[in-house]
Image (cartoon, helix red, strand yellow):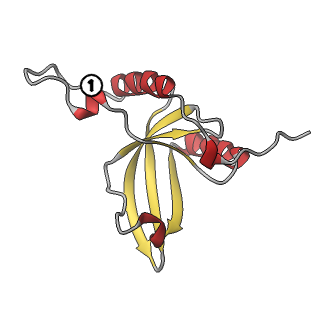
Amino acid sequence: MSEPEVDLSEIEFDHEELRVFWELARYHAKLNAAPTYFGPTTLESVPPPAWAYGDAAGESDAFVTRVLADERGETTAAAADYAGELPEVGVLSILCDGSGKPRALVEVADVTVSGDDVVESFTVVYQP
């Protein structure tokens, strides 16, 4: 018997779980900055955005499994979905599975516009 599909647009991300994941990811990916006299930076205080791929939990889980196995991934979306703001190379985000659990810290490696589509490639920076 298969599990019922979940609409990923309705996922409630657990902000505490994301914060804990971000603390570990920053440390293991060596993103924790040296102490400064000016207080914490935005990178230290605010986790990057979290997202889940696809329209259903099963699709998202399969995508995460594939990304973690290859340590890289790629998404394609209509350029209109970006409202004129394309992803920037080097930007970090947290990839979550279909239940909203953080699974990997990823970094945009390449952005290509091909006709009406935007292809975003990323690499895994950290996975627990």
Q: Is residue 18 left or right of residue 57?
A: left
Residue occupying the point 32% across, 56% down: 88
Query: Where residue 1 sits: x, y (%)?
Result: 92, 39
Q: Is residue 121 above or below residue 96?
A: below
Residue occupying the point 47% across, 22% down: 16
Amino acid type, label 1: Asn
Which residue in the rendered view is the most extreme toward the left?
37
Q: Is residue 114 above or below residue 32?
A: below
Please say whether residue 31 is visible from this viewpoint: no
Q: Quadrant of residue 25?
A: top left
Residue occupying the point 59% across, 41% down: 69
| Label 1: how many Cα within 10 Å (few below 14, some 14–19, many 20+) | some
Question: Total label count?
Answer: 1
Which residue in the rendered view is the most extreme toward the right?
1
Query: Where residue 50 sits: x, y (%)?
Result: 47, 40
Q: Which residue is mark 1?
A: 32
Query: Where residue 79 sits: x, y (%)?
Result: 45, 71
Give the SS element for disc 1. Answer: loop
Please say whether residue 17 is visible from this viewpoint: yes
Query: Where residue 66 sits: x, y (%)?
Result: 62, 46
Q: Is residue 37 above or below residue 112?
A: above
Q: Is residue 47 left or right of residue 56?
A: left
